[in-house]
Amino acid sequence: MIHRNLTLENCFLSPNGTVKIGNFAAAVSASSEKSPTSASTISTTTLPSHLASEYIAPEGRRNEWSSKSDIWSLGVCAWKLRIGKDTPLVKVATLATSPDQLSKSITASFRTPEKELVQGFLAQCLVVHPSERATAEELLRHPLGNDKR
């Protein structure tokens, strides 16, 4: 399943502190993916208009979606939770922005006084090229993705 609309508004906290994801209206089947860590791409003909654009991965803006697109969105959620405002990526993550320009913006955004732990997590999520972006499995091994800290 590729959610395609992973935003803070679609994440819910249970009484025991477990994060639950809701609103699967924009989700598409990932049955064509060969494995959970595969980054096979699903193309759609139109970008759903109700999606929050600041959370959409660069490839999603070209209507190419994979599980790695949701990893990008998770990175934007983590940024907003940590910083409390939109990322600098929102201004540059447009169809006209080249991957190199976007990479420079991501690097510049890490010049804030963030702790290395958070920086490392964000750096794994906010990678322009999906093939180089972390998988969900890899993020679960990160200290922020592991509740056994």
Image (cartoon, grey):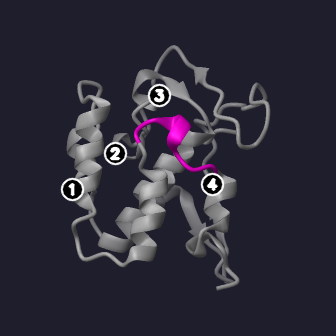
- For the residues labelled 2 and 1, the Cα–Cα distance comes to 18 Å
Q: Is residue 17 above or below residue 111?
A: below
Would you name the residue on which mark 4 appears?
Answer: 22
Q: Is residue 74 above or below residue 3?
A: below
Tell me, for residue 108, which label it has, or none.
Answer: 1
Question: Where residue 33 sits: x, y (%)?
Answer: 74, 30
The amino acid marked with disc number 1 is Ala
Label 4: state its secondary structure: loop
- For the residues labelled 1 and 3, the Cα–Cα distance comes to 30 Å
- Image quadrant where residue 42 sits: top right
- For image coordinates 42% across by 57% down, the residue present is 123
Mark 4 is surrounded, within 10 Å at the Cα level, by few (under 14), some (14 to 19) or many (20 or more) other residues, namely some
Q: Is residue 29 above or below residue 109?
A: above
- For the residues labelled 3 and 4, the Cα–Cα distance comes to 17 Å
Would you name the residue on which mark 2 appears?
Answer: 54
Q: Which residues lie in the magenta part?
A: 128-135
Left or right, 36 with respect to 115, comes to: right
Mark 1 / mark 4, whichever is N-terminal:
4
Question: Where residue 126 sits: x, y (%)?
Answer: 42, 50
Q: Nearer the viewer, mark 4 or mark 2?
A: 2
Give yes or no for contact between labels 2 and 3 (Cβ–Cβ under 8 Å). Answer: no
Q: Can residue 57 be seen by looking at this rendering? A: yes
- For image coordinates 72% across by 31% down, the residue present is 29
- For image coordinates 60% across by 48% down, the residue present is 23
Left or right, 82 with respect to 141, comes to: left
Give yes or no for contact between labels 1 and 4 (Cβ–Cβ under 8 Å). Answer: no
Label 1: state its secondary structure: helix
